[in-house]
Image: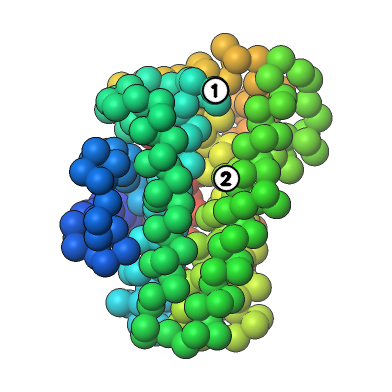
Amino acid sequence: MKTGEFEALLKTGASAVGDFLDDTLSSNQLVSGTPHHLLNAMRHGVLNGGKRLRPFLLCEVVKLFDGNQKAAMQVALAVECIHSYSLVHDDLPAMDDDDLRRGKPTVHKAFDEATAILAGDALLTLAFGLVASVEAISAETRIKLITLLSKKAGAPGMVGGQILDMQANGKPRSEIEITRMQAMKTGALISYACEAGALVAGASEEDRTRMRRYGENVGIAFQLADDLLDETGDAAIVGKTIGKDREQGKQTLAQIYGKRALEDRLAALVKGAEEMVEPFGERASVLVEAARFVSYRKH
């Protein structure tokens, strides 16, 4: 598969996720009765574009195992709600203090701080309701998905990674410390998306492990590429403020090892991801290209 073909596929997937999110925030009973001001802030935080990589990966893994695509989309929406809530909170003045997200004003700039906090809370809570209400998969599987999501998005995962990142401001960090933070802050939710896809499709335990390890490689690669973009990217292309890590005194592997060494590390992560899906041959070509895209992207 050529890069252009993959990007077109990713764009189509992002558009579909956006449409389903729009419908969910317009008519789903889980948001019925939400005050308009809060709902508008939630919509601003989750309907502002983006690659929708996490739901894309989840749906592609479900396709790989011939699973139910309707069920896949609902779980995928939950993952995107979690991701979007984390960005809304990450942009707050108490955290990264960003004014720009995906080329648009962040939620606390478009509304206010309190509304941004509550919009993030609402998106986080909505995610668990979306998974719980997927009738096309068994109650047992839904419990597994919710339990895993609680861990990967919570204190041992994404939220824990965020606190490690905040604590590192102005302090030197080792490669091990940085890698652990990245695996939690960014990698955990991406690996969840891949493992959840295997769960939704009813894949074997061995295949579920393969998808989790594939996602772990892709997740770390995503963060490393993000760090590189923060050092060398163009804000107009990236769609957010660049140079923030250096400005805030956050040490990254891009700063420690430089562009060439980081590119070698990215290549190793891509190889690791490819090895995890190698047994599936051509059927996993989209997942192979996804790992390459994440690692070598320009935005």
Residue 32: % across, % down: 25, 60
Query: For the point 37% across and 20% down, which residue is it?
Result: 99
Judge from the rendering whether residue 69 lies leftward or rightward of residue 182; answer left or right: left
Q: Where is residue 191, by image quadrant?
A: bottom right
Q: Where is residue 164, by image quadrant?
A: top right
SS of the residue at dot 2?
Answer: helix
Q: Is residue 251 above or below residue 20?
A: above
Asked whether 250 or 296 is in front, the reply is: 250
Query: For the point 45% across and 28% down, which residue is it?
Result: 91
SS of the residue at dot 1?
Answer: loop
Three-letter code, disc 1 = Ala
Q: Is residue 58 above or below residue 107?
A: below
For this orientation, the residue located farthest to the top is 247
Residue 238: % across, % down: 37, 29
Residue 154 seen = yes
Q: Where is residue 105, by image quadrant?
A: top left
Query: For the point 46% across and 63% down, which residue is it?
Result: 128
Three-letter code, disc 2 = Thr
Q: CA distance from mark 2 to mark 1?
A: 19 Å
Judge from the rendering whether residue 271 lies leftward or rightward of residue 129; answer left or right: right
Residue 255 seen = no
Residue indicated by mark 1: 94
Query: For the point 53% across and 55% down, which residue is it?
Result: 190
Density class for disc 2 (Cα within 10 Å; few <14, some 14-19, many ≥20) is: many
The way the protein has been coloured in the rendering is rainbow
Residue indicated by mark 2: 186
Residue 269: % across, % down: 62, 50
Residue 219: % across, % down: 57, 50
